[in-house]
Amino acid sequence: MHVDCIVGMSLDGRIDWIKNPEKLSEIYYGLVMKTSYDAILCGSNTILKAEMDETSSIKYSNQTLVVVDSKAKIKNWEIIKKQAWWNEKPIVLCSDDTCREYLQTLEQLSIDYIICGKERVDLSGAIEKLEKKHSITRMRIDSGGALIGAMLRNRLINTITVIIAPQLTGGISPQTIFSSSDVSDFESIIDIRLEDCRTQENGYVLLKYSIVIANS
Ligand SMILES: NC(=O)c1ccc[n+]([C@@H]2O[C@H](COP(=O)([O-])OP(=O)(O)OC[C@H]3O[C@@H](n4cnc5c(N)ncnc54)[C@H](OP(=O)(O)O)[C@@H]3O)[C@@H](O)[C@H]2O)c1
């Protein structure tokens, strides 16, 4: 599986309080539309916060939406299915702890799910199943720092592209692109290699890195 992560942030790495979000979106979607992906991986909080068009009937993409939702937070699946950015066959990643009623609801809605992991989703195992069962081999993450953090800690991301908005936000809440527990040794630090660097209009900067996998 090849996994790209593309994320917009302030110079200090925050993903919230982005000014002129439409400008960032223009650069973001300009970029994602250039590459063909089988799927988009989202966290449940990202889906809950996303603006949904309740009357949407067009489709810009045939990608599969894959959502991590072991806590059964998402209810509006019928509206989610209609959105333009993905096809009408989402896949939900659940764990052994996901409540039975939620799985039944997904079945009633003809939504596929994968159970992998005890309390939270075992992301590595789930990705293997996505590849084997659903032939998904190229995916992009559209998510906040919690899911990106878990994916990075498990070394499941190949490239990370950041679009830096020309702003400094500040603050101490963990709304950064890499939200996870603190490191306790240098081995846990993820080395990255700069692959591309471009300035955009109005002071936005795009940086693309590949993740250096240990021993490669
Ligand atoms: N600036 C950007 O480019 C951009 C892009 C997308 C989203 N966002 C913003 O990001 C914010 C949401 O970010 P977020 O980080 O709170 O939420 P998130 O990206 O939705 O991530 C939370 C998800 O990650 C899963 N998760 C977290 N740690 C895990 C672990 N160790 N193992 C397995 N799964 C794990 C959770 O699983 P469970 O199901 O188990 O809870 C949950 O589904 C929103 O405000 C959204 O608007 C910004």
Image (cartoon, grey):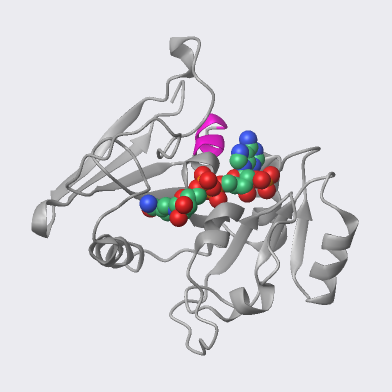
- Residue found at the very far front of the displayed protein: 171
- Identified at 40% across, 40% down, the residue is 177
- Identified at 77% across, 45% down, the residue is 116
Return the x and y of residue 201 as percentages of the image width and height: 10, 59
Return the x and y of residue 210 as percentages of the image width and height: 35, 38
Could you say which quadrant of the image residue 108 lies in? bottom right
Q: Nearer the viewer, residue 20 or 216?
A: 20
Considering the whole magenta stretch, tell me its main secondary structure: helix
Return the x and y of residue 66 as percentages of the image width and height: 61, 60
Label total for image: 0
- Identified at 34% across, 41% down, the residue is 14
- Residue found at the very far top of the displayed protein: 185
The magenta span reads 149-154
Q: Does the magenta-highlighted stretch encompass residue 67?
A: no
Residue 2 seen anywhere in this rendered image of the structure: no
Q: Does the magenta-highlighted stretch encompass residue 153?
A: yes
Residue 206, above or below 195: below
Residue 199, above or below 37: above
Could you say which quadrant of the image residue 33 lies in? bottom left
Residue 188, above or below 111: above
Residue 153, above or below 202: above
Q: Nearer the viewer, residue 174 or 78?
A: 174
- Identified at 50% across, 34% down, the residue is 152
Residue 42 seen anywhere in this rendered image of the structure: yes
Q: Quadrant of the C terminus?
A: top left
Return the x and y of residue 74 as percentages of the image width and height: 68, 62
Q: Nearer the viewer, residue 28 or 145?
A: 145
